[in-house]
Amino acid sequence: MPQHIAIGSQEHKELFCRFFIDSHVAFDAAAVHWPELDEASLARLRSLPFWAEAVATERATACTIQAWARLETEPLLHEAIALQGYEEQRHAMLLQGLTTRYGMAVPSQPEPQLPVDAERAFLCTGYSECFDAFFTFALFAMARESGFFPPALVELFEPIMQDEARHILFFVNWEAYHQARRPLWQRPRHLWRGIVGRGLQVWHRLQAARGLQQQGDFTLKGHQSLPTTLSPRRFLELCLQENERRLGRYDARLLRPRLVPSLAKALCWVLR
């Protein structure tokens, strides 16, 4: 990491919190001007199977992050985490607006339940976003390049994709900072939670890939819905390329997610 910065230091906290706050893009999801779409574009949008799951996921994520923000007493960390909760809520509102505007039936859903263990829920949410964003960046690029999504919609959702890049960068730095600041006797418990959280995400994705758990995995469903001739290796290479493009614009001193890119690189080597 260029110009080494001590993980867990005040400088590290200032770096990852200020990066996140300063890179926030302000817009009002309720005031979005939705473009008129032709019948073919509408049909493609309405054919996608994951709108209800996407809205529910964003709402649940916002609820989890807002719950953790309320427990954070350090002012700068609280500001950054609360901002992430606001952005996740904005994502849910934008998706809800999309489905309403273009007539995609999304059943009414109950309010998300507050997590019993806010820290554990925040960790699991962060690990999940690191997995999902890695593949979603590539899926979005495929939809953009293939013309599956009209350019006007691509432009509207581009800031959302970049929000996700910011979210995972903030999370991996927050986790490293949080671990470094804990008393030594508490670190094994936090480390174990991290291992379990990552392991659960790997297991969930393996189940989905094997067809054992299709329900609730809208990233996988999105891949199946897009017209593509990419080989598995080329898709993983695109994931790595888009991940680097999205994250590469931010300060090189910030920690990056490593697990999923490392697994993808290993699979690319196997699939040679």
Image: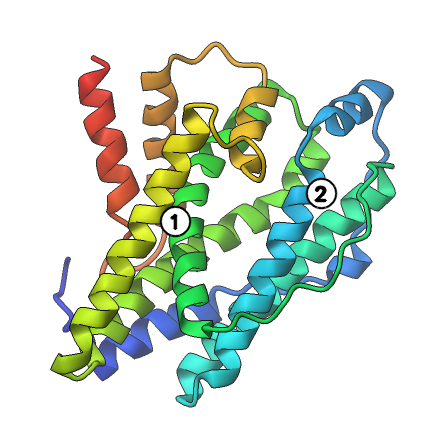
Residue 57 disc label:
none
Q: Is residue 253 left or right of residue 133?
A: left
**Pointer 2 or 1: first along the chain:** 2
- Which of the two residues, 187 or 164, is positioned nearer the viewer here? 187
Please rate how many residues cluster around mark 2, counting C-alpha atoms within 10 Å: few if below 14, some from 14 to 19, many from 20.
some
| Residue 207 position by quadrant | top left
Which amino acid, by three-letter code, is at mark 2?
A: Ala
SS at circle 1:
helix
Label 1 environment density (alpha carbons within 10 Å; few <14, some 14–19, many ≥20): many
Q: Which circle marks residue 52 in the picture?
A: 2
| Mark 2 → mark 1, Cα distance in angstroms | 21 Å
Residue at image coords 41%, 84%: 76
- Is residue 254 at least partly visible in the picture? no
Q: Amino acid at mark 1?
A: Cys
With 89 as the anchor, is 247 left or right in this view?
A: left
Q: Which residue is mark 1?
A: 130
Dividing the picture into quadrants, the one containing residue 88 is bottom right
Question: Foreground: 196 or 173?
Answer: 196
| Closer to the eye: label 2 or 1 | 2
Looking at the picture, does residue 103 appear above or below residue 80?
A: above
Pick whichever, 223 or 98, lies toward us: 223
